[in-house]
Amino acid sequence: CMRLPEKQLFGLPVTLDMRDVSGLKEGDKVLLRWDGEDVAVLEASSIYKPNKVVEAKECYGTSSLEHPTVHSLIAEQGAFYVGGKLHGLKSPAFRYPTQTPAEVRAQLPEGKEVVAFQNRNPIHRAHFELLKCAQRDVADSVLLVHPTCGPTQPGDIDGLVRIATYEALREETEKDFPMFRWAYLPYSMKMAGPREAIQHMIIRKNYGATHFIIGRDMAGTKSTITGDDFYGAYDAQETGKKFAGELGMKVTHYENMVYV
């Protein structure tokens, strides 16, 4: 079930894992730091040891350690979760430029549809052709190029390298495609297939998008042993379309883009 207790749609849980909670009790305030800087204070209202096998099955559709994120969840992350109200102090300083949802929305023209494009890989020509098609298919729209730049799965190319490909394309095309906007999302991909598609739709709506592109096998992954897919090629598309009305978004989908 992709629902919060109040029944709002939500794709994946946001958790803070800890290896040791000795000395920590409910009501304590926990200082969260990133790269040596204070970024937030968490009021610890719940401290517990989750059933990660159940969490994996519910979130990723499998509890198999052959799924890279399930392996990380069970074998690498801390055994305890701490939850509660979060008070932000400052945004983390990432190695690449980022903008808040409000900052991105302020750059979008009023009264126009906004088509958001998500990608976890370096951009290539087929991607760019897809962008042009999407912007053309949604009349008089703005195309928000908004790739994720955080960790993804083992074997993927580093975020800074991915950003460099987008920056190069932006500089080459900004005169001919003034209806494109570019921003980078500090988000760690979970490779959760259909549920992650919902998470991305919610995020992009916060950034001002009215439409969201879902391509073939979005947020999909394969078994690290057999190479078999964990999700169907169009599961994410179908899930996105199923909940699009509830989210106030429209799904723009493309089955495949090929060189000819």
Image (cartoon, rainbow, N blue to C red):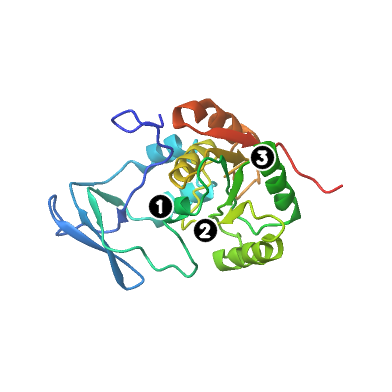
Question: What residue type is disc 3 on?
Answer: Arg
* Residue at mark 2 to residue at mark 1: CA–CA distance: 14 Å
Left-right relation of 141 to 27:
right
| Image quarter (top left, top right, bottom left or bottom right) of the N terminus | top left
User: Closer to the N terminus: mark 3 or mark 1?
Assistant: 1
Identify the residue position indicated by label 1 in the image: 102
Question: What residue type is disc 2 on?
Answer: Tyr
Identify the residue position indicated by label 3 in the image: 216
- Label 1 packing within 10 angstroms: few (<14), some (14-19), many (20+): few
Q: Are marks 2 and 1 in contact (CB under 8 Å)?
A: no
Question: What residue type is disc 1 on?
Answer: Ala
Location of residue 101 in the rendering, given as x and y in whole percent from the top left corner? 42, 52
- For this rendering, which residue is in front, 209 or 225? 209
Looking at the image, which residue is at 43% across and 44% down?
Answer: 206
- For this rendering, which residue is in front, 220 or 116? 116
| Residue 5 position (above or below residue 75) | above
Looking at the image, which residue is at 65% across and 55% down?
Answer: 178
Location of residue 260 in the rendering, given as x and y in whole percent from the top left corner? 87, 47
* Residue at mark 3 to residue at mark 1: CA–CA distance: 30 Å
> Does dot 3 land on a helix, a strand or a loop?
loop
Left-right relation of 211 to 45:
right
> Does dot 1 land on a helix, a strand or a loop?
helix
- Kindly tell me whether residue 223 is visible in this rendering: no
Total numbered badges shown on the rendered structure: 3
- Quick one: which residue is furthest to the right in this view? 260
Identify the residue position indicated by label 2 in the image: 184
Quadrant of the rendered image containing residue 212: top right
The mark lying in front, picked from 3 and 2, is 2
